[in-house]
Image (spheres, rainbow, N blue to C red):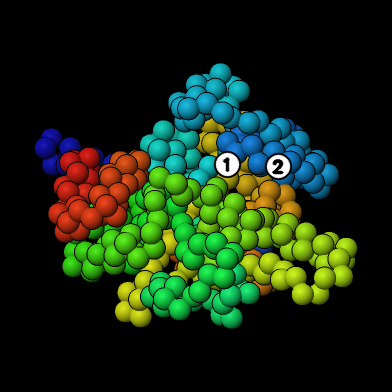
């Protein structure tokens, strides 16, 4: 009896393994049978659809016109209606979960990649198994794929991004400075002739932008920013970069309490700043200034009046030997696995990410993550800055990092011991990670 039981058990195991192997083979064959090109994939999804209407949630008011235009184009092309719903609550995934249970949740939604771990742990993000490596490589930079990667799997479709850039007054600088050291050298030689221009400004109270000073040399939650236990910010190089950061507080005479992203933008608009580190959403402001200068030039005959000439460049390194690395946030269309129709949700996600990428800037003033030709000079620089950035970490302890690093940066800027502050930051985050 014992021998017979063993044989039965072995046979059952083999049968299960065989069925599993067949299942995997069938799944592989199914995926390989789906067209790999954009149009083929879109039409395949449409054939699988069981509805002609889906809902898309968004959390940024500036996305409304762009999404409504996208929905209109999508309906005209595929005969499927998309309702754009603005979410302005504080518990996105809890509310999404509840709404999904009630049959009123979104099929697809737009969020920054910093929300990915929370989306995954809430069960509100379907894995993207549809895009193969070739499609990713041909159409998106690696940073975009990294941004939507969690646990070595991709989720949703990257759509647009935010990062930082350097804006400089080309009337005073023939070329953009390659390093902050170059900016300091310019400051030493610059003579203000009464224009009361500040030389160099950024929001020094923002830990998101200050992270650029040591991001090249620290470990912020692993390569893809999705490993909470992978954190190390108190090594020798990090100390060196933050000592450099500290030295700027005395050199640049900046009161961190009086400087914000808005004040930097305002100084550029008022033409009272030589150089500024700005969010990439400065681009529409610069276009507006250029248009205004053109109008004013047509209305005046004063050839001697100097016109504003602000341009965009890459964020400078710190010194010739110390590099800088900006963070970036990628906004993605994530698919709700409990929505009405995941086929149409995937379809609309890829439509936003790839299908109408060339309409992105006109839609909401953001640049698409998709690799494309046709960008002007300023857009090309910002896109290149994005390509060489690090995705903002997507771990749930990101908020703790921003809070704790903000404390550390503030103390360092104020003259506190750099090594001690970084060790305290390391210890505080290790406590949060446990």
Position of 4 with respect to 113 (left or right) is left
Where residue 272 appears, as percent x and y from the top left, is 58, 60
Q: What is the C-alpha distance between the residues marked 2 and 1?
A: 10 Å
Secondary structure, mark 2, is helix
Q: Nearer the viewer, residue 259 or 90?
A: 259
Q: Residue at x 88, y 63 (%)?
A: 299
* Residue that appears at 32% across and 62% down: 250
Q: Is residue 25 visible?
A: no
Residue 220 position by quadrant: bottom left
Q: Which residue is mark 1?
A: 110
Quadrant where the N terminus lies? top left
Disc 1 crowd rating (10 Å Cα; few below 14, some 14-19, many 20+) is: many
Of helix, strand and loop, which one carries label 1? strand
Task: Classify residue 173 by image quadrant.
Answer: bottom right
CB atoms of marks 2 and 1 within 8 Å: yes
Question: Which residue was labeled with disc 2?
Answer: 67
Q: Nearer the viewer, residue 89 or 138?
A: 89
Q: Is residue 219 at least partly visible in the picture?
A: yes
**Percent position of residue 242, x then y:** 27, 62
């Amino acid at each position: 009896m014992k021998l017979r039981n063993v044989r039965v058990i072995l046979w059952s195991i083999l049968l299960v393994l065989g069925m599993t192997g067949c299942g995997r083979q069938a799944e592989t064959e199914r995926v390989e049978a789906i067209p790999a090109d954009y149009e083929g994939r879109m039409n395949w999804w449409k054939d699988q659809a069981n509805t002609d209407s889906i809902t898309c949630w968004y959390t940024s008011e500036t996305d409304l016109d762009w999404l409504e235009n996208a929905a209109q184009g999508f309906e005209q092309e595929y005969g499927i209606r998309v309702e754009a719903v603005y979410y302005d609550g504080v518990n996105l995934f809890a509310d999404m979960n509840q709404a999904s249970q009630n049959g009123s949740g979104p099929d697809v939604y737009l969020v920054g990649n910093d929300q990915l771990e929370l989306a995954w742990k809430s069960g509100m993000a379907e894995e993207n198994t549809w895009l193969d490596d070739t499609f990713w490589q041909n159409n998106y930079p690696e940073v975009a794929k990294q941004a939507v990667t969690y646990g070595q799997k991709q989720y949703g479709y990257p759509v647009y991004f935010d990062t930082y850039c350097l804006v400089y007054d080309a009337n005073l600088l023939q070329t953009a400075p390659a390093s902050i050291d170059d900016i300091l050298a310019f400051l030493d030689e610059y003579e203000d002739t009464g224009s009361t221009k500040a030389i160099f400004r950024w929001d020094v109270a923002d830990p998101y932008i200050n992270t650029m000073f040591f991001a090249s040399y620290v470990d912020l939650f692993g390569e893809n920013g999705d490993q909470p236990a992978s954190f190390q910010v108190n090594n020798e190089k990090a100390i060196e970069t933050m000592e450099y950061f500290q030295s700027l507080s005395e050199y640049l005479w900046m009161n961190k309490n009086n400087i914000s992203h808005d004040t930097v933008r305002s100084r550029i608009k008022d033409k009272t700043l030589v150089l500024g580190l700005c969010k990439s959403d400065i681009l529409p402001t610069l276009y507006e200034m250029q248009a205004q200068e053109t109008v004013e030039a047509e209305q005046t005959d004063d050839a001697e009046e100097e016109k504003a000439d602000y341009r965009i460049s890459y964020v400078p390194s710190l010194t010739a030997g110390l590099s800088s690395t900006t963070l970036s946030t990628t906004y993605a269309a994530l698919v709700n696995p409990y929505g009405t129709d995941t086929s149409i949700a995937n379809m609309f996600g890829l439509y936003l990410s790839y299908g109408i990428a060339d309409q992105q800037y006109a839609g909401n003033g953001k640049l698409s993550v998709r690799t494309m030709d046709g960008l002007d000079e300023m857009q090309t620089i910002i896109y290149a800055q994005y390509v060489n950035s690090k995705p903002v970490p997507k771990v749930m302890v990101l908020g703790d990092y921003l809070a704790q690093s903000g404390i550390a940066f503030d103390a360092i800027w104020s003259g506190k011991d750099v090594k001690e502050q970084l060790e305290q930051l390391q210890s505080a985050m290790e406590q949060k990670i446990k």
